[in-house]
């Protein structure tokens, strides 16, 4: 695990390069497992639906993958911080879907996590 370099009075340029202070980026890990009876077509449709209904409208990005079991990270598309509302929106999306073991981690610093 890396640690944030400590220094006082960093320049704005250095803070941006280190992604600290006002340039800190927060995200969260996301994992879920499709039920055994879900077909390939349903998997594709549900992942597309997640992206179209939650990820894109909230200006988030998802990097990850899987087949029956998926895992990855959610962060903002541009420099920024995910919020608790983002995390809850993703969890809410899965509420009535044919999935189990949905886990959205707590928010954390995606660069210095």
Image (spheres, rainbow, N blue to C red):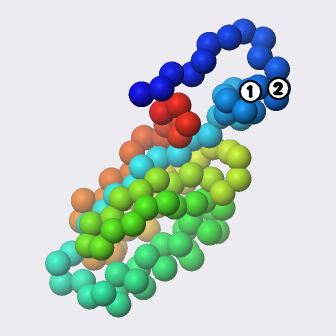
Residue 21: % across, % down: 69, 26
Label 2 sits on residue: 12
Residue 105: % across, % down: 39, 45
Residue at 62 percent of width and 69 percent of height: 56
Above or below, 103 relative to 33? above
Label 1 sits on residue: 15
* Label 2 Cα neighbours within 10 Å, binned few <14 / some 14-19 / many ≥20: few
Residue 65: % across, % down: 39, 66
Residue at 67 percent of width and 33 percent of height: 19
Dot 2: element: helix
* Label 1 Cα neighbours within 10 Å, binned few <14 / some 14-19 / many ≥20: some
Above or below, 34 relative to 13? below
Q: Disc 1 to disc 2, how far (Cα)?
A: 5 Å
Residue 34 appears in which quarter of the rendering?
A: bottom left
Residue 97 as seen in the image, left or right of residue 12: left
Residue 89: % across, % down: 50, 60
Residue 83 shows in the view: no
Residue at 42 percent of width and 85 percent of height: 45
Residue 29 as seen in the image, left or right of residue 14: left
């Amino acid at each position: 695990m890396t640690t944030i370099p400590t220094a006082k009075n960093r320049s704005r340029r250095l803070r941006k390069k280190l992604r600290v202070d006002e340039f800190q980026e927060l995200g969260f890990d996301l994992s879920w497992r499709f039920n055994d009876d879900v077909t390939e077509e349903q998997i594709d449709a549900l992942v597309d639906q997640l992206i179209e209904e939650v990820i894109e409208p909230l200006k988030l990005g998802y990097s990850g993958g899987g087949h029956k079991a998926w895992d990855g990270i959610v962060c903002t598309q541009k420099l920024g911080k995910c919020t608790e509302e983002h995390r809850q929106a993703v969890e809410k999306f899965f509420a009535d879907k044919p999935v189990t073991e949905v886990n959205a981690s707590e928010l954390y610093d995606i660069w210095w996590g």
